[in-house]
Image (tube, rainbow, N blue to C red):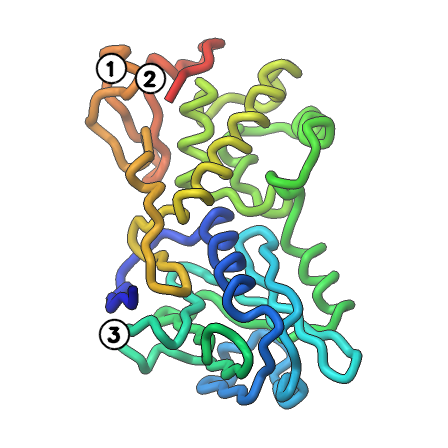
């Protein structure tokens, strides 16, 4: 169902599950469709490759993939391949034409199609913190290498264990370091650590192999569950069809400051001092806690 919304004042960036939902909807509705028009309203919304925009006329969409928090659309034209990489940023959305929006002046790019279930894909971004990049394969490879580390959904347990054993510092900061682990932000770092019974300030070097393996399994479970529920529409995120992500109804600690711990331990959820978006239970996630908590 089309949705009319206003997302001017959010401060929460879409994360891996939201980007995955976007890529899956685009694949389902536009894969194999042909580009009939490319409209770019602001040249500065294109970070790289603006002069190549005419190449996409007549190109066929052959892929829509997620990389970290970005979505890469792959096109073929005369046996050559190029990509449109969308950074969602804090308020960036990829929307089908059937999704009505307030403030249409914030639609900065339109790709029109024939032969798909949708006739248009729009890049809507009022605050313009995100950008589009028009890249060839070599450019895409450079983009991915520069921006993204290990992918939580495709990395093996062995690779994850090895990565954490080589690192130092705070656990939550590491989970959110995009050049180390790609795609996790505040919401899912909070939820993963709560379910694993690990304090956000826990030092990575203190984790045993067993704890790292448990963290890996819970990380995958949380991200997979969030994808199944359409991601988390806390303030800014809407899928291309205008639907809201319902995983926000399953958050256990994010934004729950002052509420009783869902593990029924008798304590209330606190916000980490000095950090606006770090939430934890002081009992279930005490620095010395070794118990895994159940949702």
Q: Nearer the viewer, residue 273 or 271?
A: 271
Separation (CA) of disc 1 from disc 2: 7 Å
Which residue in the structure is indicated by mark 1?
267
Badge nearest the viewer, 3 or 1 = 3
Number of residues whose C-alpha sits closer than 10 Å to that of mark 2, classed few (under 14), some (14–19) or many (20 or more)? some
Which residue in the structure is indicated by mark 2?
282
On screen, residue 80 versus residue 39, left or right, reads right
Q: Quadrant of the N terminus?
A: bottom left
Separation (CA) of disc 3 from disc 1: 42 Å
Which label's residue is closer to the chain start, 3 or 1? Answer: 3
Q: Quadrant of the C terminus?
A: top left
SS at mark 1 in the image: loop
Task: Say if mark 1 contacts mark 2, CB within 8 Å.
Answer: yes
Number of residues whose C-alpha sits closer than 10 Å to that of mark 3, classed few (under 14), some (14–19) or many (20 or more)? few
SS at mark 2 in the image: loop
Which residue in the structure is indicated by mark 3?
102
User: In the rendered image of this protein, does residue 116 appear above or below residue 291?
Assistant: below
Q: Which residue is rendered at x = 46% and y = 80% of the image?
A: 119
Using the rendered image of the protein, determine whether residue 273 is visible from the camera's viewpoint: no
Task: Say if mark 3 contacts mark 1, CB within 8 Å.
Answer: no
Q: Which residue is rendered at x = 58% and y = 83% of the image?
A: 35
Which label's residue is closer to the chain start, 1 or 2? Answer: 1
Which label's residue is closer to the chain start, 3 or 2? Answer: 3
Q: Nearer the viewer, residue 127 or 93?
A: 93
Task: Say if mark 3 contacts mark 2, CB within 8 Å.
Answer: no
User: In the rendered image of this protein, does residue 100 appear above or below residue 279?
Assistant: below
Which percent across, then down, holds residue 174? 56, 35
On screen, residue 280 versus residue 133, left or right, reads left
Q: Nearer the viewer, residue 116 or 39?
A: 116
Which percent across, then down, holds residue 178? 58, 47
């Amino acid at each position: 169902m089309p949705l009319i919304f206003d997302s001017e004042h959010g401060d929460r960036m879409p994360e891996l599950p939201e980007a995955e939902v976007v890529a899956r909807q685009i694949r389902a509705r536009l894969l194999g469709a042909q580009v009939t028009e490319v409209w770019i309203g602001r040249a500065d919304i294109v970070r790289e490759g603006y002069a190549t925009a005419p190449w996409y006329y007549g190109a066929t969409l052959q892929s829509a993939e997620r990389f970290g928090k970005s979505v890469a659309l792959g096109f073929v034209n005369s046996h050559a391949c190029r990509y449109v990489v969308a950074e969602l940023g804090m308020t960036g959305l990829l929307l089908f034409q059937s999704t009505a929006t307030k403030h249409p002046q914030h639609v900065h790019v339109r790709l029109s199609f024939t032969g798909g279930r949708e006739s248009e894909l729009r890049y809507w971004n009022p605050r313009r913190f995100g950008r589009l990049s028009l890249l060839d394969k070599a450019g895409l490879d450079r983009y991915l290498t520069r921006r993204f580390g290990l992918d939580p959904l495709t990395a093996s347990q062995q690779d994850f264990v090895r990565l954490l054993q080589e690192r130092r510092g705070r656990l939550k900061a590491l989970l959110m370091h995009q050049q180390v682990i790609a795609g996790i932000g505040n919401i899912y770092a909070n939820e993963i650590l709560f379910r694993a019974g690990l304090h956000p300030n826990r030092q990575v070097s203190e984790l045993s192999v067993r704890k790292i393996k448990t963290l890996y399994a819970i990380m995958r479970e949380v991200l997979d569950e969030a994808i199944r529920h359409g991601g988390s529409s806390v303030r800014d995120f809407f899928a291309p069809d205008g639907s809201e992500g319902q995983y926000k109804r399953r958050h256990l600690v994010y934004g729950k400051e002052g509420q009783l711990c869902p593990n029924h331990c008798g304590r209330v959820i606190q916000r980490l001092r000095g950090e606006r978006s770090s939430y934890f239970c002081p009992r279930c996630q005490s620095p010395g806690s070794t118990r895994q908590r159940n949702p």
